[in-house]
Image: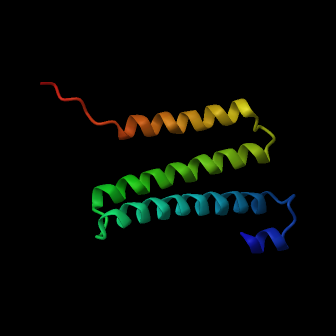
Amino acid sequence: ALVVALTQDPEEAWAVAAIVAALALAAGALAMMVQLRRRAGRTRRRVPPPIRTVVVRRGAMVTAAVALLLWLRVVDGLSLITAAFVLGTFVAAELVLSARPVSSR
C-alpha cells in the first residue's frame, strides 16, 4: 500500500482501490491478531477451533466495515449519518450471529 501511495497518482482508480483494500485488510488482520492474543493469553494454550472461527468472522466484518467506510469517503458519500448506519449494521449483524440459541424447554 505504501508503494502504491508513494508512486501512483491518486487520480487513478486502481491505485485508490488498492489503498482502500490494503488498509481494510490490515485493519481486519490487526483485529484478528488482537483477539487471538487476548484469548490465548488467558489460558496459555492454543485457541480452540470454534473460537478461531469467531475471530476470523469478526476480522472479516472489520475488514468489510473499514473498506465500506473508506470507499464512502473516496466517493464523498461519508457523513456522520451514513457512518452510523454502516457501523450499526455491522454491530447488529454481530449481535445476531453471536447470540446463543434459546432452548425450547
- Name the residue located 38 percent from the left edge and 39 percent from the top edge: 97
Eyeballing the image, is 12 above or below 62? below
Query: Could you say which is closer to the camera, residue 37 or residue 32?
Result: 37
- Name the residue located 43 percent from the left edge and 52 percent from the top edge: 57
Q: How is the image coloured?
A: rainbow
- Name the quadrant containing residue 76: top right
Q: Furthest residue to the left?
A: 105
Q: Residue 24 at what x, y percent from top left?
A: 62, 57
Query: Could you say which is closer to the camera, residue 100 or residue 60?
Result: 100
Q: Is 64 on the left-hand or right-hand side of 11?
A: left
Q: In which quarter of the image is the N terminus?
A: bottom right
Eyeballing the image, is 2 above or below 85? below
Q: Quadrant of the C terminus?
A: top left
Q: Residue 79 at what x, y percent from top left?
A: 76, 35
- Name the quadrant containing residue 17: bottom right
Q: Is 57 on the left-hand or right-hand side of 27?
A: left
Number of marks in the rendered image = 0
Query: Could you say which is closer to the camera, residue 72 or residue 102?
Result: 102
- Name the residue located 55 percent from the left edge and 63 percent from the top edge: 30
Eyeballing the image, is 32 above or below 66? below
- Name the residue located 75 percent from the left edge and 61 percent from the top edge: 14
Q: Furthest residue to the front?
A: 42
Q: Residue 72 at what x, y percent from top left?
A: 73, 42
Q: Residue 45 at what x, y percent from top left?
A: 28, 70
